[in-house]
Image (cartoon, rainbow, N blue to C red):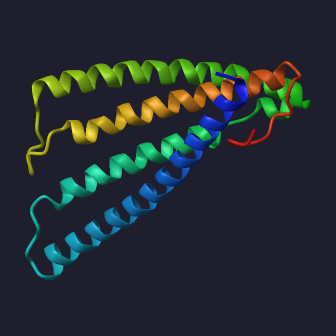
Amino acid sequence: MPWKTMHRFFSAADRVIDKSASALIIAGGALVTLSVVLQVLLRYVFKVPLFGLEEFSRLIAVWVYFLGAIFGTKWDAHVQGDVAGRIFTTNRSRAVIKTIAWAISLLVCILFLYHSAKYCIWLHGTGERTTGLWWPRIYSVGSMLFGAFFMTLYSTANLIKYSRAAGGRLDPTPGGAT
């Protein structure tokens, strides 16, 4: 498959992921907010709590957290303490530091992917369910595997981007832009 075709395919897939995840984060954030407000009203104003609403909001929240982690990885927007940026002033030297940081991040993402996959497989085999609504626990734990997979992909993309910049073949741009 030619490079341009692959690039177009991955760019299109990235746009779909971007739009879908953005919509899911917005919808999930709204659902969590509404469910918490509803639970507070029902429990403390009307004195009639709704069973399972906490479990529902927790399920949605964990998915929103991992979708946010995917975006943080994609856009290189995680919380960072960048002292090296003050010491190294050229774009190339900063790209070398970023390459090292992304290599470490990729290693951590691979370990996270491995352990979350192993845990999901084990959990699926046990058929474990939540205590309140008896939903399969894989619904919430699957968010770890999903997040780890895409964080690994975007960590790889960032490592490639910054290693190319460190080699002098590309001017590094901040975030997910190339």
Residue 45 shows up from this direction = yes
Q: Residue furthest right?
A: 90
Q: Quadrant of the C terminus?
A: top right
Q: How many marks?
A: 0
Q: Quadrant of the N terminus?
A: top right
Determine whether, in the image, residue 132 is placed left or right of residue 87.
left
Task: Look at the picture and state if 44 lies above or below 98.
Answer: below
Q: Position of residue 123 (x, y in %)?
A: 18, 27
Determine whether, in the image, residue 20 is placed left or right of residue 45.
right
Q: Nearer the viewer, residue 154 or 106?
A: 154
Which quadrant of the figure has residue 40?
bottom left
Residue 80 shows up from this direction = no
Q: Residue furthest bottom?
A: 46
Q: Nearer the viewer, residue 44 or 29?
A: 29
Q: Residue at x 7, y 75 (%)?
A: 48
Task: Look at the picture and state if 135 lies above or below 88.
Answer: below
Determine whether, in the image, residue 103 is placed left or right of residue 38.
right
Q: Position of residue 42 (x, y in %)?
A: 15, 76
Q: Residue at x 59, y 47 (%)?
A: 15
Q: Residue at x 20, y 58 (%)?
A: 54
Q: Position of residue 167 (x, y in %)?
A: 85, 18
Task: Look at the picture and state if 91 lies above or below 13.
Answer: above
Q: Position of residue 133 (x, y in %)?
A: 9, 51
Which quadrant of the figure has residue 77?
top right
Which quadrant of the figure has residue 82?
top right
Q: Residue at x 64, y 29 (%)?
A: 6
